[in-house]
Amino acid sequence: MRIQLRLKDKMTLWYTLLTLLTVTAFSCALYLMTDYVLSEMLESSVRLSLRQVVAQIENRDGMLTFEDEVPITNSAMFYITEENGSELASYGEDIPLFDAVETQPNEFRVAQGDGQRWLLLDSGVITVERSRLRVRVAGSLATNDRVLSTMRLVFFVSIPILLLLSLLGGLFIAKRSLTPIRQIIRGADRIAQGDLSARIPAARARDELGELTDTLNRMLTSVEETFLREKRFTSDASHELRTPVAVIRAYAESLRAEKGLPPDAAAALDTVIAECARMQRIIAQLLTITRGEEGRYPLCIERLEGRALAEGVAETLAGRLAEKEITLTVDLPEGLTLYADQSLMTELLLNLVENAVKYGKTGGQIHLAAGRQGDMVEIRVRDDGIGIAQEALPHIFERFYRVDSARDRSGTGLGLSIVAWIVRVHQGSVAVQSQPGEGTTFTVRLPDGPAQMAE
């Protein structure tokens, strides 16, 4: 399973990783450079000691002697042997430990002796007055080892501390850097909830995020103006269409009332009257939505009896229920009350139950129930109809949206949009669960009291 990290965490991890790589590379480079410099210095010191030792070997009256007039560094030992293997001179107690080390003239080797390491250098064959000699010099690596050991200890202690500081610093930097993005997200959330007047706070820094904020605000202003023009057009068009549709219906009904009409003419007039009624309902619903969204719909919040409200809806839709032989079960406890606008709440229940009837199966069941859940009143409308596809669920509260498989010309396509608006103005929420072929359940949650609604 792939772990999804937030941008702040990614930035912090990348910052820490970069710091780790940088510090590790620098530490390794410093360690290797120090090791190289110390090795070069020790090799130079051993070569110098070898030259000093060789320079003090003399032949006096046929006898080889070592003058020992120039002191050799205390960190070095030497061993001078004649051609027959006899010792001419030596310095250092540990130099005999290296007798078993094979002689390799003019090459440096590292050997272990008495708990510490030594750098060995053998001279070639030296001829002094026909006498042949060899010299071996050993320089102690103790100082080098102590310095490198100290560096390793410093690295092992300091690198974790630097990583911790880098992690904390990365979190701080990432948090400050992403603050404008958090503001953009909060502004976008407000806009997504329907507040098109919301704007993203302008960034103080005039950087790319500041430019992005200004661009988004300009885009939102344009979107809001377009949306307001659309609402104004919808409201104006609905208002202007009411009278012509009413006139057409009146004339059609007048003509239909005349006696002796041919069957074809009567059927045509019935169709006109039905479509006019449908258009009048669409116009009325559009006016309700647009006025509500513009804040021109006056709410009248009062205490309502839940059971009486539900039974009134059942009585209104009795004819539709009987046509499809659908049984409506009302399950509301006695004494359940809610605070809402009576006309809007009636419209909400009518739309939900009518939607269940429309897409319910013949001889099916619809269950209308309600009850208290904490400080909320929960209303559920469940049917056993054709259901809704999962990909359609996010769109069902949009205006004029219909699921293709359930398209029905008898509806207006605005019922669920009105439900969503009524729930919103009552400070509540609406949710839907559905499985194709099994049915649909709408759940409405409303504040249990006028005090909560006013918040």
Image (spheres, rainbow, N blue to C red):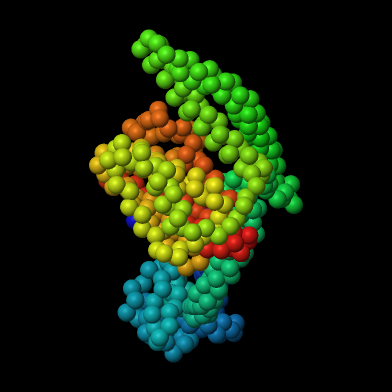
The answer, for residue 139, to whether it is visible in the render is: no
> x and y percent of residue 259 in the render?
42, 13
In this rendered view, identify the residue nearer to me: 403 or 336. Answer: 336
Q: Nearer the viewer, residue 147 or 325?
A: 325
Q: Residue 66: x, y in percent?
A: 51, 83
Quarter holding the N terminus is bottom left
Q: Who is closer to the viewer here, 137 or 60? A: 137
Q: Residue at x 63, y 39 (%)?
A: 291
Residue 214: image location, x then y, percent: 70, 42
4 over 245 or under it: above or below = below
Task: Name the residue: 43% across, 52% down.
Answer: 310
Residue lying at the far bottom of the rendered structure: 93
Q: Is residue 297 above or below residue 72?
A: above
Instruction: From the top left corner, tell me how far across and down residue 332 is, in percent.
Output: 39, 60
**Towards the viewer: 80 or 215:** 215
For residue 434, side relative to residue 258 (left or right): left
Residue placed at 39% from the left, 42% from the top?
317
The total number of labels drawn is 0
